[in-house]
Amino acid sequence: MMGTALSRWTMSYFTAALAFLVGAQVLMIAGYGFPAVPAEAPETLTLVHMVTIGWLSLLMCGALFQFVPVLIAQPLRGGRLVLPALICLLSGLAFLLAGFLQLAGTIDTDLPLLAVAGMLLPAGFLLVVGVLVGTLLRANLTLPARFVAAGLACVLVTVTLGALFALLLSGFLPALAGLDFRTHALPVHIAVGLGGWLTFTAIGVSYRLLPMFMLSPDGERASSRVVWWSGIAALVLIALASPIVAMVEGTGLMATPDTATGLAATLGLVSLILYGVDLAFFYRHRKRRVIELNSRAAQGALLALILSALLLLALLATGTLGQHVGALLYLVAFGWLSGLGLSQLYKIVPFLTWLECYGPVMGKKPTPRVQDLVVERRDRVWFALYFLGVLSGTGALLVNQPDVFRVAAGATLLATLAIVVELVLARRLYNVEDGKRLPDGTSRPRLFLPSP
């Protein structure tokens, strides 16, 4: 990692992502979107895409531009496309959100806002995938890199379906208007997006980051390979459930989409169980006995992932998945994915700041430690408050208490803002002792723009 070049625009991706996270939480507290309105309402779609694209996808893209080179020990290829990708993603997301507001009647215009989004967002993600795949193809793929490659394939599927939805809603695809496109494609859009692009990629990155930060053995394990294969099989089944059912029925055998979905859920559960076994191995065999706050906070995200799997099984067993899918998706998005993202940002931002500021004088002058850029004893409470708020919010959604949910969302917002402040303080070297802050030959990094 120390010998890897810094990705110039990673901090810009992180800043934009955090802004969308805070904005989405503010809207939830204000009662905008689900559960105040139905899950399919334009207001809810606005909120959902602020989280999934604005927060989680921008966070993932920024992280991958920095860590894919680490995974394969190769420099980033096509780095000049990273900024155009960010511009396309931000402008496309702006048009998408405006398009949903147009559907809600908040914006009155005849401009095909969703159609424009349906072109800009795929362009942005294609640039992202092109840069990362071009980099991955330069080396033999380690297991974490193979997870990332699968996640990149999933984002292409997700974005393609999303673009079709946008064009269909704009009236540009009359051939699909008479088809039951939404019933078959929407579950795939959600499952492959959350389960493939975001979760599968996060698993791959965590297989590298957590052992690296805890000094744990990171060799490829048999259980990790099963996680990969079972996860891939589950994603393929989800994506191809309808065609598979049609083929089976053509042979005269009985089959339903629920059969493929149940098998996919079983394989996904196997993948998650063995992933948990691997993480327990990392924590148990770490050389760093006292782990840092980011690794402790990641345990909260992993607990949320386990609870999400258990909740899914319970909802499937009771036949109430449709009734409580909002609570499940909230726990996945904010407990597992956002919790893991915030916990690792707490380490990544100081780590990259240290490399940017003190890397040029490393070994030549006394420098602070990476952990000197943050104050862990002050920040533990914020991660605890965040996960407590997420669990309370999930419970409120399950028992249909929207006012309690808004209070719980307020707790997560407070914790998020506090964590963001700590990241800004780390970026500005505020916690470093005056005598060690800026030795000769160093300069304070910019907050979110690359150094000149």
Image (cartoon, rainbow, N blue to C red):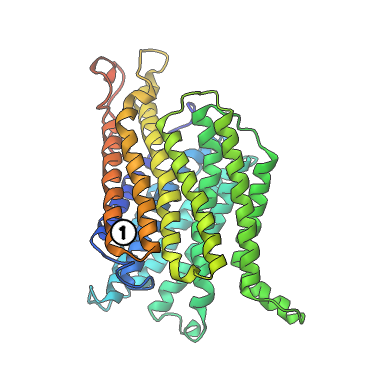
Q: Determine the residue located farthest toward the bottom in the rendered image.
A: 178
Q: Does 142 sit above or below residue 98?
A: above
Q: Secondary structure at mark 1?
A: helix
**x, y (%) of residue 230?**
66, 53
Amino acid type, callout 1: Phe
**x, y (%) of residue 70?**
52, 35
Q: Does 28 sit above or below residue 384?
A: below
- Label 1 crowd (10 A; few <14 / some 14-19 / many >=20): many
**Pick the front one: 230 or 65:** 230
Residue 434 quadrant = top left
Is residue 157 left or right of 421 when viewed as pictured? right
**The C terminus is located in which quarter?**
top left
Is residue 198 left or right of 43 when viewed as pictured? right
Q: Which residue is at a point 52% across and 30% down the rendered structure image?
A: 212
Q: Which residue is mark 1?
A: 405
**x, y (%) of residue 113?**
32, 71
**x, y (%) of residue 213?**
49, 30
Q: Which residue is at a point 32% across and 43% down the rendered structure image?
A: 385
Is residue 232 left or right of 249 when viewed as pictured? left
Q: Which residue is at a point 53% across and 61% down the rendered structure image?
A: 314
Residue 293 quadrant = top left
